[in-house]
């Protein structure tokens, strides 16, 4: 599901990928549900491709972070003031991802992740589990056929 949710630089909120053309995407805003073109010249990133720096070698996928927030908040939106202090942002994020790299993950990044989470919950897009590839789905089907 996160592979189809896009962040477009310079545009507020998140967008759901509807279709893909030669030099553009058609995307629907999750804020106002209007559809429109997103051109290749725009900086577009899929939420499924975002990772968060940690103090260890391995980065954590946004999927894992969103799942941690979902568990902490029991699937409800995060209640936070838009004027939340930097220290409070870091303290909250540390409760979700204790080993995040405090030097490379900025408060603006944390605020953006929290707003994205709230927008996804509002839209009912809360399945943050890892998506399986077609190959993995074929293997599971083959195994279930063998067990019958």
Image (cartoon, rainbow, N blue to C red):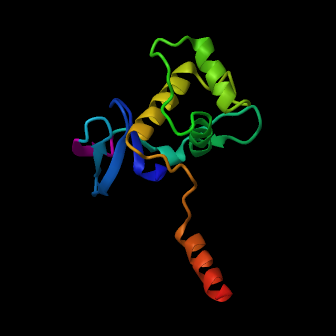
Q: Quadrant of residue 97?
A: top right
**Viewer-proximal residue among 15 and 140:** 140
Q: Count the numbered circles shown.
A: 0
Horizontal arrangement in the rendering, residue 53 relative to residue 1 (left or right): right
Asked whether residue 67 is drawn in magenta, I would say no
Question: Quick one: quadrant of the C terminus?
Answer: bottom right
Q: Position of residue 30 (x, y in %)?
A: 33, 40
Q: Residue at x 34, y 39 (%)?
A: 42
Instruction: Specify whether 96 is left or right of 27.
Output: right
Query: Which residue appears at 51% of the width and 28% of the height?
Result: 78
The image quarter containing residue 66 is top right
Q: Tell me where residue 81 appears, x and y as whole percent.
A: 47, 16
Predominant SS of the magenta segment: strand
Q: What x and y, as percent, mark residue 23? A: 28, 52
Residue span colored magenta:
34-41
**Where is residue 140 drawn, in percent x and y?**
61, 75
In the image: residue 99, left or right of residue 19: right
Q: Where 2 sits versus 119, above or below?
A: below
Residue depicted at 68% across the width and 40% down the height: 59
Return the residue nearer the eye: 145 or 116.
Answer: 145
Residue at (45% x, 16% y) in the render: 82
């Amino acid at each position: 599901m996160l592979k189809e949710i896009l962040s477009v630089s310079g545009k507020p909120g998140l967008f759901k990928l509807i279709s893909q053309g030669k030099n553009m995407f058609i995307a629907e805003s999750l804020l106002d549900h209007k559809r429109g073109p997103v051109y290749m010249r725009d900086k577009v990133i899929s939420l499924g491709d975002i990772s968060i720096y940690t103090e260890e070698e391995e980065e954590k996928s946004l999927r894992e972070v969103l799942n941690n927030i979902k568990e902490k908040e029991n699937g409800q939106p995060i209640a936070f003031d838009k004027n939340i202090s930097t220290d409070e942002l870091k303290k909250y994020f540390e409760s979700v991802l204790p080993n995040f790299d405090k030097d490379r993950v900025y408060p603006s990044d944390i605020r953006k992740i929290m707003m994205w989470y709230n927008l996804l919950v509002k839209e009912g897009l809360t399945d943050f589990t890892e998506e399986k590839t077609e190959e993995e789905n074929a293997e599971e089907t083959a195994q279930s056929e063998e067990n019958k």
